[in-house]
Amino acid sequence: MSLLEIINLIAFLAVFGYAFYLFAKVVYSRYMYVRLGKPADFSADMKFRMNQLLVYVFGQKKLMKDPKSGIMHIILFYGFIIIQFGAIDLFIKGLFPGKHLPLPAYPVFTLIQEITVLTVLLATLYSFYRRFIEKLPRLKRGFKAGLVVIFLTVLMTSILFSAAFEHHWGLSEPLPTWATPVSSVIAAAFSWMTPTAAIVMFYIFWWVHTLDVLAFLVYVPQSKHFHLLVAPINWFLKRQTPPGKLKPIDFEDESLTEYGVNKIEQFNQKDLIDLYACVECGRCTNVCPASGTGKMLSPMDLLVKMRDHLTEKGAAITSKSPWMPAYAFSGANTATEVAVTREEGGGYEYPVELIGDVITEEELWACTTCRNCEDACPVSNEHVGKIIDMRRHLVMTQGKMPAEATRTFQNVERQGNPWGLSKKDREKWREDLEEGIQAPTVKEQKDFEYLLFVGSMGSYDNRSQKVMHSLVKLLNHAGVKFAMLGKKEKNSGDTARRMGNEFLFQQLAMDNIAQFQKYNVKKIVTADPHAYNVFKNEYPDFGLEGVKVYHHTQLLAELLREGRLKPVKEVKERVTYHDSCYLGRYNDEYDAPRFIFQSIPGVELVEMERNRENGMCCGAGGGMMWLEEQSGVRVNTARTEQALAVDPTLIGSACPYCLTMMSDGTKAKEVEENVKTMDVAEVLAMSVDFGEQPAPVAEGVH
């Protein structure tokens, strides 16, 4: 080995060692920031965790929701993995001239490398086009956003030019032209160059490549590109609980002095990993009904602000600088620059409040809890639970909430419904049932298979009462044995919980569960997806066991399949179905309502552009049914416009809240005379011949 080669090797090891030291220090600092959070339960089925990695990391499933970006990202993802082997090969060539990776069929390896490099370069240029020329609204622009394009372009170019000048060096046995299709063309343009000049140019590009790789290595954990390392971890650690399930608060824990979250370290460690996994791709904000209708909330900005706050506060608490090398980030906050004072006893007083200084109350109250952001997120981030945790702090610790929320809580607490109407009137809706149709209470019908949970909307809202009339009529005709709690029924508590009043929710849950247990309830059916979700997924945390929960569309679909309901009358309607968030994204039920519509003669079912898992919220979730929208376009109006775009004669729904919001939307658009809004059960009831005897109930059914 010559003196120059020794110097080159020493320089490489020095630079590589320094870069890896900086990288490790940055990663460790962020690890320490995440450790500030509360311990999270990471125990889970390893088969589930490995499946998450295979499907969502290596399969890139979520990214393909946007095929253009998805294909581009798949090329970059796998291209970057393949190119790492080429980088090792190039390092060997520069450090030990005449050597390369000892691989069989080495020419094939170089061919794959060059094709991959060219493909990645084209994908990088396309990403630049999408961000800076096409100016895709969800993507940020600016120096930081373009820096990775610079890194990748330099990286790919340096690989090709290093290979091109290697052709003229003549140190190793030349490869066939087919094995180096791109670099051979570049080399041909420099055929006039002497071997000595080629050696110099090779090392110039070799060092450009080396410094670019190492600079990118140090940059990654200090930028949004940290997701390259954290996203796979985030998918691997994904919660196995039902989607959107909220964490209960233990009110018997006397050590709790406040409820909810107003300090970043009060989130658990999985929540904090979410923040560093964020890609800033804007997919969440792009589908958010609040953001899309002009509200302040942007799910992406929410996480980014929380991430930056965690980095800043983490640096203050741990005294570990978030930026490396520190001198290169003179404008950034470091551990010594953050305003922190040590209290007596060794604690920290941090001058920045999470709610108010970082996240505004307006953002928190704009969320409809629809989970479209979470469904769209390619790295498995969970936004809604964090928002509700902060709402909990506002409501239960600070006592700060919109006046409408205060009124709603008081009404639910006193009368068991959001309007504050008399609990004695909860079963009054039965008075308008057709003659011969029965809707017995548990006291009147002791032998029942299903408990019909009517809910506050079905009990008190005039429009929703008509849905209950149709549902009860269908259940009667099908011979389903059911009963309801009547005056003993209370609100499911979903509204209170999503609005942040966990204490009220738990009171309601315990009261309802006590009634379920008193009457030995084994099956519950409800037309309210919010109640369906909370009974099925969240009540078990409070003692509800051995109870199967059905949404009314699921039961009706089952009755259709069994032949106990037969739609025979033609219903000539062009129907577009609006997916309920709590039935769809929360519980993955998209098919039952569609099956019912498709079973009805004369119905033409057409889909909105945003349907199924990407269906837009009606605007009522998360307690927004009871709050007034203060800014932008009303969410239900925007959703109604999407429905009207497919020229329906009827907008179908399977949720009393959705039905109300879509009905209000058609009135706002002044089309209520031409476009009807109806629940699935109502449309089915129009088609069933109630004069015909239903099929006998098969023994052992259900």
Image: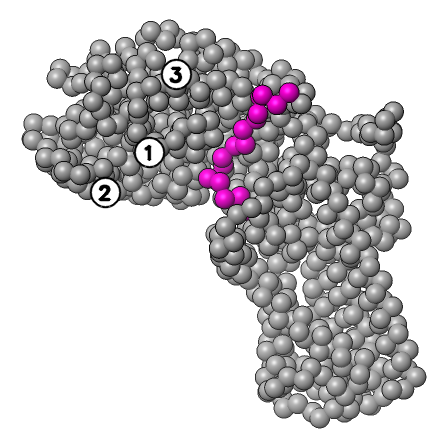
Q: Amino acid at mark 3?
A: Lys
For the N terminus, which image quadrant?
Answer: bottom right
Determine the residue located farthest toward the left in the rendered image. 692
- Numbered badge on residue 490: 3
Residue designated by label 2: 598
Position of residue 325 in the picture relative to residue 376 (left or right): right
Distance between the alpha carbons at the discs numbered 1 and 3: 19 Å
Vertical position of residue 112 compared to residue 471: above or below: below
Looking at the image, residue 475 sits to the left or right of residue 425; the answer is left
The residue most toward the right is: 3
Q: Secondary structure at mark 2?
A: helix
Residue at the spot 25% in from the left edge and 14% down from the top edge: 443
Q: Which residues are magenta?
A: 238-254
Task: From the viewer's side, name the closer residue of 514 and 674.
Answer: 514
| Relative height, residue 109 to residue 460 (above, below) | below
- Viewport quadrant of the C terminus: top left
> Nearer the observer, disc 1 or disc 3?
1
Q: Earlier in the sequence, mark 3 or mark 2?
A: 3
Front of the two marks 1 and 2: 1
- One can see residue 181 in this view: no
Checking the image for residue 548, the label placed there is 1
Q: Is residue 345 magenta?
A: no
Q: Magenta segment: does it hold 246?
A: yes
Q: First in sequence, mark 1 or 2: give its number.
A: 1
Q: Amino acid at mark 2?
A: Gln
